[in-house]
Image (cartoon, rainbow, N blue to C red):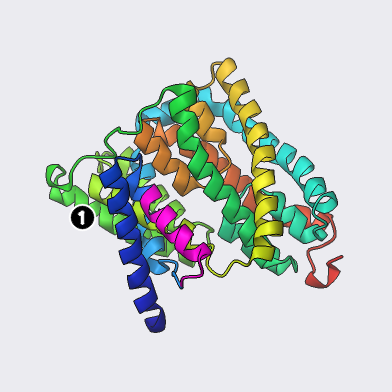
Amino acid sequence: MKSELPRIAATTVLAAAGTALFVWIGLPLPFLFGPLFACLFAALAGAPVANPGKIGVLMRTVLGVAIGASITPDLVERLPQMAISLSLVPVYVIVVGLIGVPFFRRVYGLDKPTAFFAAMPGGLQEMAAFGEETGAKVRTLTLIHGTRLLVIVLIAPLILVMGFGADLDNPVGEPASTIPSHELVIMCIAAIVGWQLALRLRIFGAAIIGPMILTAALSLGDIIHYRPPAEAILAAQFFIGMGLGAGYVGVTLAELRKDASAGLVYVGIVATIAALFAEAVILMELAPDLEGFLSFAPAGQAEMAILAIVVGADLGFVVLHHVTRVFFILTCSPIAARLLGFANPKDKD
């Protein structure tokens, strides 16, 4: 880790320069897109940029706390109203898999385990970890899922603005100076303790899920009444953008042509399926436009949480749908892998 510190520091400076440029030009979401584009271009140019590592993971705990603080008694009372839209999430995942696996097998010639985990709309790290256990090509999975997340993060704000008339300039939170100091301390404790407990329990996405569950309990117990301050949310945006861009370091032209392009084409497929489910939820009046779109957008919990905060959507509603999607994939994909006969790495075709 010590040998990585100079690279991480240099990458952070580069990301900060990208943020400053976006602020100066007046572009939207400068703390997310500024670091993302700066690190992405540097990575593709062959510069030795570095992923923020544990700092980036730590920043995800902020989003976990923000989500948990949004789970209020009012949201819990509305759970029966969300039952139908939540029940559509597993159907959505199954449809994506039934289309995605044959697509990667027949069009790109991927082996069975790689095609299966490339098709699952789960988190990059989780799908790479499961894929590695079954003998899938981890580098291919990383590029395909990384491209999916990157493209969705880039185009979702455009759709929100142009398609739904959303405003990306909503305040992301209250300034730290306006939040009671004891609540700030409680949120910090909830972030670290929740993260570490989730790690001990081997929960995937521990940095978000652990703090989310603990903070939700504190919110429902009338102990926490605020989300993390704006400064913390902006810092989370910064390091998530930095990590997305730096994820392309070392990518070759051959990998861009095959794996990244496969991810790009697949984005169109999975986004179309997501749009159909979101439209169904909106037409059935199960959710407002913004919440319906964000709840089925095929990106990660962290990225969708940021967008929900920025556009002022119902954060709890949106994230409950993404948690349902991730939980379903994490629990069912290993079972499906065994049933399909490639749970053993030696059984790679």
Answer above or below: position of 20 versus 136: above
Residue, disc 1: 185
How crowded pointer 1 is (Cα within 10 Å; few <14, some 14-19, many 20+) is rated as: few
Task: Report whether residue 76 is seen.
Answer: yes
Camera-nearest residue between 92 and 1: 1
Give the residue at x 43% y 53%: 37
Left or right position of 112 against 79: right
Q: Residue at x 83, y 67 (%)?
A: 348
Q: Position of residue 10 (x, y in %)?
A: 34, 71
Q: Amino acid at mark 1?
A: Val
Q: Nearer the viewer, residue 45 or 265?
A: 45
Q: Position of residue 118 (x, y in %)?
A: 70, 54
| Start-end of magenta stretch | 33-47
Name the quarter where the N terminus is drawn.
bottom left
Residues 97 and 192: in front is 97
Which residue is pictured at 46% across the width and 23% down the height? 164
| Residue 45, magenta (yes or no) | yes
**Which quarter of the figure has residue 343?**
bottom right
- Residue 217 vs residue 165, the one in the foreground: 165
- Could you tell me residue 28's position as x and y percent? 35, 39
How far across and how far down the image is residue 57, in percent?
41, 62
At 74% across and 65% down in the image, what residue appears?
A: 136
| Secondary structure under the numbered disc 1 in the rendered image | helix
**Magenta stretch: helix, strand or loop mostly:** helix
